[in-house]
Image (cartoon, grey):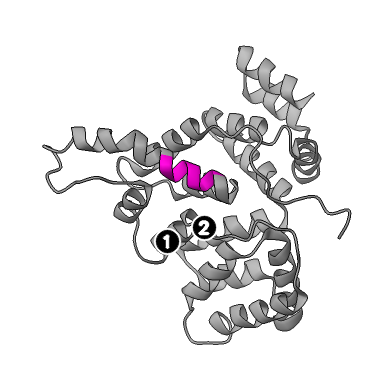
Amino acid sequence: MGNVQPTIVPCEDFDVTADIKAIRKACKGLGTDEEAIIQILANRSAAQRVEIKQAYFEKYDDDILSYKKAYAQVNERDLEADIEDDTSGDVRNLLISLLQASRDEGYEVDEDLAEQDAASLFEAGEGRFGTDESTFTYILTHRNYLQLQATFKAYEALSGTDILDTIDSEATGTLKDCYITLVRCAKNPQLYFARRLNAAMKGLGTDEDTLIRIIVGRSEIDLDTVKDMYLEKYDVTLKDALDSECGGDFKRLLIEILH
């Protein structure tokens, strides 16, 4: 395991203010952008998530109090309160579990634990009628990413099924999307970010916030590998994709970061 690079490290360009604003935006209005919340919480270290939680409370406590007359039942609220209010059931449990910053941030792999977790996931999904979402949530939010990679390999050896295929057949809706996001982050973070960049440039308009967050956020971590993954996946360089979708100083800045 000596040549393995960390799959999650403290975000080099961590901006707690930008993160709490993005989370607040995702929680407000009609519906909740769970993908945006996952994107942030799943890619910050435990210490950074704690900082996000504290900063969120400090920033938006007064904001919430300013709406006290309009929302008579609203008292002091922190990030957990907003997420609990705007989500429900298993999705809420998953997001709150991420927010607790309980993931092992180390890089050690316990093969015995991987086999135990693989068996637990099998019993929670394919091995029973219905799905025990709490088991999936606990394992996906508590194990370090290298440990999860070992678990996914053990799961496939045990069941003959890729964990993503199991999730696709056992989960539904937003919860399935959240699980798939976490698994893809764990299995191949660079491919995950390549997918996110492509999605940000597809269709009408461009999601500039996502482009900035990923390209700047990964620039000192693994952006070179993300570029390789993008070319392999979409048969076009990330630079050419940005060149065709963006313009002006914004494009020049992102391409400069790409080198």
What residue is drawn where x is 64% and y is 66%? 164
Left/right placement of residue 42 relative to residue 241 reads left
Q: Secondary structure at mark 1?
A: helix
Would you call the spot at circle 1 few (<14 residues within 10 Å), some (14-19), or many (20 or more)?
A: many
Q: Nearer the viewer, residue 27 or 180?
A: 27
**Residue 53 belongs to the span the image colors magenta:** yes
Work out whether residue 206 can be spotted: no
Q: Position of residue 38 (x, y in %)?
A: 51, 50
Q: Which residues are magenta?
A: 48-54
110 versus 245 height, above or below: below
- Res 25 label: none
Residue 106: image x %, image y %? Answer: 70, 58
Quadrant where the C terminus is found in the figure: top right
Are the residues at dot 2 and dot 1 in contact (C-beta closer than 8 Å)?
A: yes
Q: Amino acid at mark 1?
A: Val
The one nearer the camera, 51 or 180, is 51
At 59% from the left edge and 33% from the top edge, which residue is drawn?
Answer: 213
Amino acid on which disc 2 is placed: Cys
- Residue pointed to by mark 2: 178
Q: Main secondary structure of the magenta part?
A: helix
Mark 1 lies on residue = 91
Number of callouts: 2
Mark 2 surroundings within 10 Å by alpha-carbon count, few (fewer than 14), some (14 through 19), many (20 or more): many
> Looking at the image, which residue sits at the far bottom?
128
Label whose residue precedes the other's in the sequence (2 or 1): 1
Q: Position of residue 14 (x, y in %)?
A: 59, 35
